[in-house]
Image: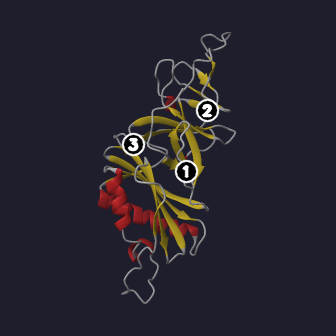
């Protein structure tokens, strides 16, 4: 089965938010998607709907490399094919019973999804990245992208690090902005250089709906300063940006928004 079209590759979560055995609900351009990871370490993205009775598969659970629906226990293998129906244990499920799948990939410390069989390349900036936080913002993607591109770097209030030239010196601007994915994509990647830490900053934008965007914030693993201090500085920067944009901080382990950005994460029991 094929999936409804989404506009190219979109980031949907930090890679480490979906550990083996975990299930996560995400939304891209209003489309309900379940992301899960089997014991083989592979992440998969499917339409969030059991073909049997339409139950959200994000309420289900992982056993090995199969995802099981919570409602009637129908089990699906890594290719989305139904392989077990508990009410009829002797029955071999018809091959036509399959979950619609999305393409799923990992790059830059993020999970990405696209319509199955997409021809759009995923532009990977490369390198190793440290997850900082994900934020839900009640604004269209274009407006969030514009706000991010104009945002100031972390201040002394955020990180406590002195500025070159003394405390009265103007904070150095981000030196570089790179739009990695095009404006027509369901997600965009903005990358900056922070000269203080010698680190790159990645802002991955996910179009949740017409007026809802998720911002996934990461920093490069290579650079100056202790990893923990840099992540804390950018976490505070993200909270300041969130307050300015009227956003809601999101944890991958609980639902904090009643909008289309609702997510569920359930570890393997």
Most foreground residue, 207 or 119: 119
**Front of the two marks 2 and 1:** 1
Task: Check if mark 2's residue and mark 1's residue have beta carbons within 8 Å.
Answer: no
- Of pointers 3 and 2, the one earlier in the residue sequence: 2
Label 3, on which residue? 261
Q: x%, y% of residue 7?
A: 44, 43
Q: Residue at x 44, y 40 (%)?
A: 6
| Furthest residue in direction bottom, as rendered | 165
Q: x%, y% of residue 220?
A: 56, 65
Q: CA distance from mark 2 to mark 1?
A: 27 Å
Task: Check if mark 3's residue and mark 2's residue have beta carbons within 8 Å.
Answer: no
Label 1, on which residue? 122
Q: Note whether residue 263 is visible.
A: no
> Is 255 rendered above or below residue 163?
above
Most foreground residue, 82 or 163: 82
- Of pointers 2 and 1, the one earlier in the residue sequence: 2
**Front of the two marks 3 and 2:** 3
**Front of the two marks 1 and 3:** 1
Label 2, on which residue? 62
Q: Residue at x 52, y 43 (%)?
A: 113
SS assignment at label 1: loop
Q: CA distance from mark 3 to mark 2?
A: 23 Å
């Amino acid at each position: 089965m094929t999936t409804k079209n989404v506009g190219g590759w979109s980031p949907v979560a930090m890679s480490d938010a979906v550990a083996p055995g975990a299930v996560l609900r995400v939304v891209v351009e209003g489309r309900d998607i379940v992301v899960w990871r089997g014991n083989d370490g592979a992440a998969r993205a499917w339409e969030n709907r059991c073909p049997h009775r339409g139950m959200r598969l994000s309420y289900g659970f992982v056993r090995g490399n199969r995802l099981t629906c919570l409602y009637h226990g129908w089990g699906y293998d890594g290719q989305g094919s139904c392989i077990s129906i508990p009410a009829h244990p002797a029955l071999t499920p018809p091959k036509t019973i399959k979950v619609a799948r999305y393409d799923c990939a990992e790059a830059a410390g993020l999970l990405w999804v696209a319509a199955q069989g997409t021809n759009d390349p995923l532009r990977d900036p490369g390198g190793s990245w440290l997850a900082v936080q994900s934020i839900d913002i009640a604004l269209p993607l274009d407006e969030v992208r514009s706000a991010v591109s104009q945002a100031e770097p972390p201040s002394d209030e955020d990180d406590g690090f002195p500025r070159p030239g003394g405390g009265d010196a103007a904070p150095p601007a981000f030196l570089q902005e790179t739009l990695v994915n095009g404006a027509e994509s369901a997600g965009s990647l903005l990358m900056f250089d922070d000269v203080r830490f010698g680190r790159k900053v990645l802002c991955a934008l996910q179009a949740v709906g017409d007026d809802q965007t998720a911002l996934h914030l990461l920093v490069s693993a290579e650079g100056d300063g202790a990893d923990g201090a840099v992540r804390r500085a950018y976490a505070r920067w993200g909270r300041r940006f969130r307050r300015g944009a009227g956003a809601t901080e999101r944890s991958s382990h609980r639902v904090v928004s009643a909008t289309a950005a609702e997510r569920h994460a359930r570890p393997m029991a």
